[in-house]
Image (tube, rainbow, N blue to C red):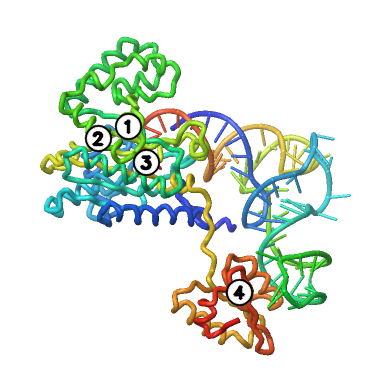
RNA sequence: GCGAUCAUAGCUCAGUUGGUUAGAGCGCCGGUUUGUGGUACCGGAGGUCGCGGGUUCGAACCCCGUUGAUCGCCCCA
């Protein structure tokens, strides 16, 4: 590589080959499954006014304060490459009058951007699939969304992950719990890790999933959300869990599972690899493959009417790692031109095969005697070799007569 | 923002305590062989050893800096 060749931006990826096939498999499976659940496809802008994210995520969150790709456009307006899907979809819901479709079930996928240090399963430009139900206050929406996530993972062939489920309660429950946690941890502040001492002020809920042994000692006796749940919030969570049981979705209660972003209420969930499993090993320290929750408070932060909503997102790269490398589909037909005089004939056959819906590839370069070997090394159903003296020969594991039929050749 | 490890051919990697013109496999190109065959053989192209300094008679190897990658911390999907 020349020194003059510009290098790719840190944290971006050029995906090709087996990895790209795995990526496509994830997206195609998602598209198929979301149709089964009747989620409508939406296409969203990749950038928004900065305030869309700043107001919805909370000014003090790390995402907003240091992880956003923001810039001023030529008119001097601050814009931001989307760090997540939910805020943009909420904005679109409000600005396009999609209230008329509520409850609205939508799905999308595409690139997202966060200015972070790249590591295994984390990139600055990464890709997610996303599903949201907007304008549905009932727990059945949570259940359907989770049933879809569960089916998607199974259809991807990922069986060693489990749904970890928690409730954050309604706004009042959450605030009371949060206050109790601060009281509890403040009493032992000087015994906590440095990180958690900081979290105590900024994000006390996060102490609950600290990895530091100094913090872990205090976690079993920390106040539990259940003690602070209103009757209504309790009933909501019970309806979600019984619905999941009815839908055959396996789950475990995770009392320490919280959300980093301010707008979450009630249900919070993550699909996490089972310890010791192949998926856990494949993902390294980035263990969550699909996560989401209910965000009843979000619409108001964007100036809309109170609107209940629930959604999830999953990193395509992480899912692709669990799916594993995938091979390209075999070509239906490969034509080898072993005599350049027969090139035009081959081109005609190519067009006929492709027009009939068969994938076809032409090999007509390099030493004529080595072209056949080249064809044999590619994954294929039928090879047609055009030889000197107008002879032709076939080979392949699956001498599909329908493929040869469309180019007027038969065994 | 912090830490650890790493950087040699298009790819995967050797390269001894510092010692002549830096190697292999795969891939690519050409030739021979085979001619229902994924073979074998021969040859070729392709490297300022990430970059910049330093130590030394001599550096891919030792030292400093720098850039990049990987993995982890913070945070988070």
State whether residue A131 is above or below residue A333: above
Residue A363 spot, x, y in % from top left: 60, 75
Nearest to viewer (mark 2 / mark 3): 2
Q: Residue at x 51, y 63 (%)?
A: A329
Return the chain for callout 1: A
Mark 3 or mark 2, which is nearer the start of the sequence?
2
SS at mark 4 in the image: strand
Name the disc covering residue A240, or none.
2
Mark on residue A165?
1
**Label 2 vs 4, first from the N-terminus:** 2
Whole-number angstrom distance, CA of label 1 to CA of label 4: 53 Å
Q: Is mark 1 on a helix, strand or loop?
A: strand
* Disc 3 target residue: A290
Chain-order first, disc 4 or disc 3: 3
Q: Residues within 10 Å of mark 3 (few under 14, many from 20)?
A: many
Q: Residue A304: x percent and y percent?
A: 12, 43
| Chain assignment, label 4 | A
């Amino acid at each position: 590589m020349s020194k003059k060749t510009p290098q790719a931006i840190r944290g971006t990826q050029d995906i090709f080959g087996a990895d790209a096939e795995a990526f496509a498999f994830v997206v195609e499976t998602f598209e198929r499954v979301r149709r089964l659940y009747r989620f409508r496809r939406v296409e969203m802008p990749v950038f928004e006014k900065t305030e869309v994210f700043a107001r919805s995520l909370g000014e003090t969150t790390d995402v907003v304060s240091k992880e956003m790709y923001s810039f001023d456009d030529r008119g001097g307006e601050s814009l931001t490459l989307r760090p997540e899907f939910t805020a943009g979809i909420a904005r679109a819901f409000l600005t396009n009058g999609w209230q008329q479709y509520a409850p609205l079930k939508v799905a999308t996928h595409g690139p997202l951007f966060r200015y972070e240090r790249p590591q295994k399963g984390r990139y600055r430009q990464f890709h997610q699939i996303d599903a949201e139900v907007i304008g549905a206050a009932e727990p059945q929406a949570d259940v359907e969304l989770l049933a879809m996530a569960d089916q998607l993972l199974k259809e991807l062939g990922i069986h060693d992950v489990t749904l970890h489920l928690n409730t954050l309660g309604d706004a009042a429950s959450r605030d009371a719990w949060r206050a109790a946690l601060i009281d509890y941890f403040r009493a032992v502040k000087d015994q906590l890790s440095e990180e958690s001492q900081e979290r105590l002020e900024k994000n006390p809920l996060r102490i609950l999933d600290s990895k530091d042994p100094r913090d872990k000692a205090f976690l079993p006796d920390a106040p539990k959300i259940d003690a602070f749940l209103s009757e209504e919030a309790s009933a909501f969570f019970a309806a979600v869990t019984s619905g999941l049981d009815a839908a055959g979705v396996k789950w475990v209660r995770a009392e320490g599972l919280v959300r980093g972003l301010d707008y979450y209420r009630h249900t919070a969930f993550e699909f996490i690899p089972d310890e010791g499993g192949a998926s856990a090993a494949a993902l390294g320290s980035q263990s969550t493959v699909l996560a989401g929750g209910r965000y009843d408070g979000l619409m108001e932060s964007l100036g809309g009417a109170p609107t209940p909503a629930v959604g999830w997102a999953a990193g395509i790269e992480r899912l692709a790692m669990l799916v594993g490398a995938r091979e390209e589909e075999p070509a239906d037909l490969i034509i080898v031109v072993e005599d350049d005089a027969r090139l035009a004939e081959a081109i005609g056959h190519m067009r006929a095969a492709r027009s009939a819906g068969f994938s076809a590839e032409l090999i007509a370069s390099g030493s004529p005697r080595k072209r056949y070997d080249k064809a044999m090394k590619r994954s294929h159903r039928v090879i047609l070799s055009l030889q000197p003296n107008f002879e032709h020969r076939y080979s392949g594991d699956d001498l599909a007569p329908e493929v040869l039929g469309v180019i007027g050749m038969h065994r």
